[in-house]
Image (cartoon, rainbow, N blue to C red):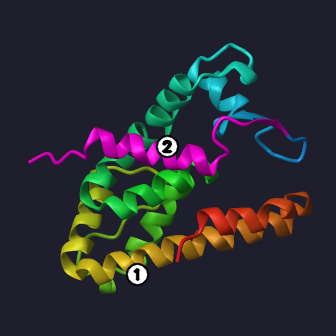
Amino acid sequence: MVITFPEDRIEHLITDVMKAEGWDTYTNDPDDAGKETKWGITLASARAYGYTGAMKDLSEAVARAMYRKRYVDEPRFADVLAIEPNIGAELIDTGVNMGTAVAATFLQRWLNGFNDTGSRYGDLHVDGRIGTVTLDALRAFVRWRGPQGITVLMRGLNGVQATRYLEITESKPSQRKYLFGWVLNRVEM
């Protein structure tokens, strides 16, 4: 049986991410790894999607399509949303801010860590890609641990996200100006 996540909820999640990214603000901060950015979409991401126009002119509709393709459908985070909406939303947000492979790796690492000596589901190969094995492990984890497990998994995902932000600023001090906002807007309690 295929379970899908309602389209209007996906659009709402994309809106939330776009707001966290600065909505329709155009920036070109030399310290920002993304350089030219609008709607939270970097120039590199826009070009990879096939957008050839000026970043200042990037429309909301094109940005939404990019978010949907790159941060929801391609990494299979829509499949995670269908299993557990909070975890899926967290992966989308983390994927936008850190890369989808990083978000998927965080999930795979935590699922392995919580796997009760490997007896609840097969240990995952941590490769940063969501596939059938990862989705099956998430289903098994949610069945086994229930709502409390979801809470703990969310805490784990947010914990490694916060740690990664700190590590980024430690290795590249120019990024310190973003640290407070990253933790405030991206790491949930």
Residue 69, compared with residue 152, is above or below; it is above
Looking at the rendering, the stretch of residues picked out in magenta corresponds to 1-28
Count the marks: how many? 2
Answer with left or right where residue 51 lies relative to residue 56.
left
Residue 13: x percent and y percent? 43, 48
Answer with left or right where residue 139 lies relative to residue 20.
left
For the point 36% across and 43% down, the residue is 10
Does residue 153 appear anywhere in the picture? yes
Answer with left or right where residue 136 lies relative to residue 62.
left
For the point 82% across and 46% down, the residue is 32
Say which amino acid is labelled 1. Val
Label 2, label 1: how many angstroms apart (C-alpha)? Answer: 26 Å
Q: Helix or strand or loop: what does disc 1 sit on?
A: helix
> Which badge, 2 or 1, is on the more N-terminal residue?
2
Is residue 163 covered in magenta?
no
Does residue 127 appear anywhere in the picture? no
Residue 69: x percent and y percent? 45, 32
For the point 48% across and 78% down, the residue is 155
Say which amino acid is labelled 2. Thr
Q: Residue 152 has which mark? A: 1
- In this figure, which residue is indicated by the disc labeled 2? 15
Q: Helix or strand or loop: what does disc 2 sit on?
A: helix
Residue 65: x percent and y percent? 47, 27
Answer with left or right where residue 20 lies relative to residue 38.
left
Residue 53: x percent and y percent? 69, 13
Residue 184, compared with residue 26, is above or below; it is below
